[in-house]
Amino acid sequence: MKSEKKNREAGIPQSGILKRERPLIIAGPCSAETPEQVMQAASALALDDRVDYFRAGIWKPRTTPDSFQGIGAPGLEWLQEVKKETGLKVTTEVGSEKHVEEALKAGVDMLWIGARTVSNPFIIQEIADSLKGVDVPVLVKNPLSPDIDLWEGALIRFLRAGVNQVGAIHRGFFWWGKSNMRNQPLWHIPLELKKRLPHIPVISDPSHIAGKRNLIHLLSQRAMDHHLDGLMIEVHPDPENAWSDAAQQIKPEDFYDLMNDLFGDICLATSHELLDELRAEVDTMDDMLIWALATRMELAEKIAEVKKTAGLSTLQTGRWEQVLQRVKEMAAISGIDSSFIEKIYNTIHNQSLNLQNNRIKTNGAHSKKEHNFAL
Ligand code: PEP
Ligand code: MN
């Protein structure tokens, strides 16, 4: 494969990795809360032999300091107990060298790097260096922002440190507009990552994409339709009362149903449900388009002020030709019909000129109108 040759040339190791015959399934609560909660979740999940690893967050990198920050190192003993009692392999999130050291000492079988940590190459390098010579699989979540290079860069740091089994977790991307999902799936990004690093498995984490239980089935189905390599699902014995991510965790019974639906003979995602999910993605793209248009118009008004002060006319033909040329080229790269883009841009340009002319006519009086970006 072309990118494998390119990667070899770029010094990216091709070794080991978690390649497997069937999807990799990781399940368990968002956070380890109490020894009883951990054991209850694990015993239920151990009954399903499709589960490869039991997950539970011990150290929780929460957005706000007032949320539950994780039980910390004492929870590692509960994971040891899970291994002993159920035979399940266990995995937890690490965000520092110290976490790695403690987790490995406790016999944690696989580590994952969270979305907030992966954005910091200093920490990623430190964690990667601390894993030199250690044979433990590492999964790297995508960063909060849709920056594929940052995600790929983190994976390469682990590969170059000699970690043999590296994988990626797609958990969706932060978007500040309104949406019915907590994070946007932007499926083309994990698919592009698979093209860039074909030997690295990419699994999906529908729990963190959805942010709510009722979308998990659909998103899991989409991940499988896209041939991703597995799933990480948050499962809790009493989801409504979970100490973190309560809205998105599912009960063990619902997890069994999900597995049966996904991997049994019948595919239960109806076209109606798939349509709903695709429409939700389209709605998010519309949110982004409106935000971009509102911002563009606001910039055009600012430009009008500058043109007025400089005594320039509103229409600057040379600049408009450049803009049109640039967007048509971008359209061609993105596989969009360039005459369609030209039509849209003519409309945008006319509106922009109208706004600029009005602004100049009103003697530059600044409109008090604020754009509502649906923050
Ligand atoms: C988690 O897996 O519980 C978690 C905190 O995920 P993320 O890093 O994707 O937000
Ligand atoms: Mn969580």
Image: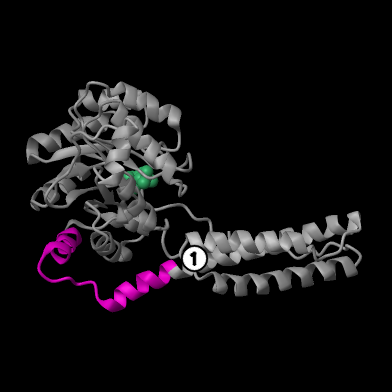
Q: Amino acid at mark 1?
A: Met
Residue 232 locus on image (x, y percent): 25, 50
Q: Is residue 268 magenta?
A: yes
Residue 279 locus on image (x, y percent): 41, 73
Residue 241 locus on image (x, y percent): 31, 53
Element type at mark 1: helix
Q: Is residue 83 left or right of residue 326?
A: left
Front one among 357 and 24? 357
Front one among 319 and 135? 319
Coloration of the structure image: one colour
Q: Is residue 238 left or right of residue 319?
A: left
Q: Which residue is under mark 1? A: 285
Please name the residue shown 30% across and 25% down the image.
Answer: 161
Q: Is residue 367 left or right of residue 196?
A: right
Front one among 235 and 4? 4
Above-or-below relation of 32 to 309: above
Q: Is residue 211 visible?
A: no
Magenta residues span 253-281
Please name the residue shown 17% across and 70% down the image.
Answer: 267
Q: Is residue 70 left or right of residue 228?
A: right
Please name the residue shown 49% across and 68% down the image.
Answer: 336
Which quadrant of the figure contains the C terminus?
Answer: bottom right
Above-or-below relation of 43 to 296: above
* The quadrant where residue 303 appears: bottom right
Q: Magenta residues: mostly which secondary structure? A: helix
Residue 2 locus on image (x, y percent): 29, 45
Q: Is residue 259 visible?
A: yes
